[in-house]
Every structure is written in C-alpha cells, then in structure tokens.
Amino acid sequence: MTGFEPFGGYIQNPSEQIARQLDGSEVGDYVVKSFVLPVDTDIAPLRLAQIVQEYRPAALVLLGLAFGREGISLERIAVNLKDWQIQDNAGNLKTDEPIDVRGPTAYLATLPIRQIKAALDAAQIPAHISNTAGLYLCNQVMYGGLHLAATQTLEMRCGFIHLPATPELTQTTGKPDAPALSLEIQKRAVQIALGTLTL
Ligand code: PCA
C-alpha cells in the first residue's frame, strides 16, 4: 500500500497517515506493507517500481488525497497523461505530457472496485466509483502501477483509492464547508477495501 506526502499547501495528507497506521497490519493471510511516496513526478514512479520489484505484492493499493470530493473515490481508470494545475513538490509543472510515450492510452483498475463499493455501502461509509483520478500524481502512480503489472505480467491487482479531506484539513485550509470524513472512518474504509481482496 502507498500513501502520498502532503502537497499543494495541505498540512497533512490522510493517505500518508492511513498508510503509516496500517503498516504491518494483517488482512487474512496477508500482511500490509506501507510506503509513503513523494509528490514528485520523477521520483514517485521510480520508488513504486522499486517497491514492486522488492516485495512482489499480491496487490498494490495506492492511496491519495482528493480535497473537495465527497466520500471515498474508487478509481476506475488511469490515463496516459499529465496535465497539472499546480506544481509537484519538486517544482515541476506538466502540461499535455504523456506518462509513458510507448504506453497505452489508459488502464482500468484491477482491484474489485464494485465489490469494495458494496462492502463500503454495507458499512454505511460514503463511497463511489470515480471515472477520473485527475491528471496529477495520483493518476500517474495508478497508471504506473497498472503499467508495471501489465508489462511484467505480474499477478498483482492494482488500483487507486482517493480519500476526502479530514475535518482538520478543511479547518486549516480555511474551507470548513468542504466535504470531510474523519481519519478513523477513512481508515476503516481502507481496511474494508483490503478485506475484499482476500474474499
Ligand atoms: N493527491 C494528489 C497527488 C498526491 C495526493 O495525495 C492527486 O490527487 O493527484
């Protein structure tokens, strides 16, 4: 599992917090190994490739923050494009640039997003299937993870879950009316999503 470091002026990133909190936890016969990726278009994909090579995970569950979204977003699709509104943490800014010039236009998530949605509905945690992970770093690492699985023919399910803001984040950004879910509920949502992988 991966989360991202803070970016774009947000003081925290719930994806980092949850990745850290669930590191080492057990899900069925599997153990969660978590990493925090930098919001850096050059380093993040290298780090991801290293992780996959070293651990050969059964599943790669990628997490990130989508401030402003309602509930948990189960991403369906990653597209081969970077087109950003803000710089990454290394000061890069990309416009209309492919992620991989030789890669396919898009990949579909191989996590069981429909099952995860049903499990979250049953737990009364707000969630939806999202048809865009944006065109920033989250889409890039989702594309990267799926591209690794496809090109290295790994039996590794992969997908991206966007998390909403926490109440702390909406307060500190001066947008107290933005949608938010507590870190505890977000963490439970991620645990439920991981649980579906062992069914
Ligand atoms: N969210 C950003 C990148 C890092 C993160 O947590 C995104 O949605 O692309």
Image: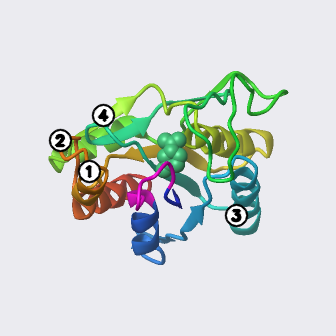
- Residue at point 44% right, 25% down? 131
The CA distance from mark 4 to mark 2 is 20 Å
Do the numbered discs 2 and 1 sit on residues whose CB atoms are within 8 Å?
Answer: yes
For mark 2, what is the residue? 177
The CA distance from mark 3 to mark 1 is 32 Å
The CA distance from mark 2 to mark 1 is 7 Å
Q: How far across and down, in percent of the image, does residue 30 sit? A: 49, 69
- Residue at point 53% right, 60% down? 5
Near mark 1 (Cα within 10 A), the count class, few <14, some 14-19 or many ≥20, is some
The CA distance from mark 3 to mark 2 is 37 Å
| Lower sequence index among marks 3 and 2 | 3
| Lower sequence index among marks 2 and 1 | 1
Q: How far across and down, in percent of the image, does residue 97 sit? A: 74, 26
Q: Amino acid at mark 1?
A: Thr
| Lower sequence index among marks 4 and 3 | 3
Which residues are drawn in magenta?
7-15
The CA distance from mark 1 to mark 4 is 21 Å
- Asked if the stretch drawn in magenta spans residue 12, the answer is yes
Nearer to us in this view, 121 or 105 = 105
- Residue 51: give its label: 3
- Residue 170: give its label: 1
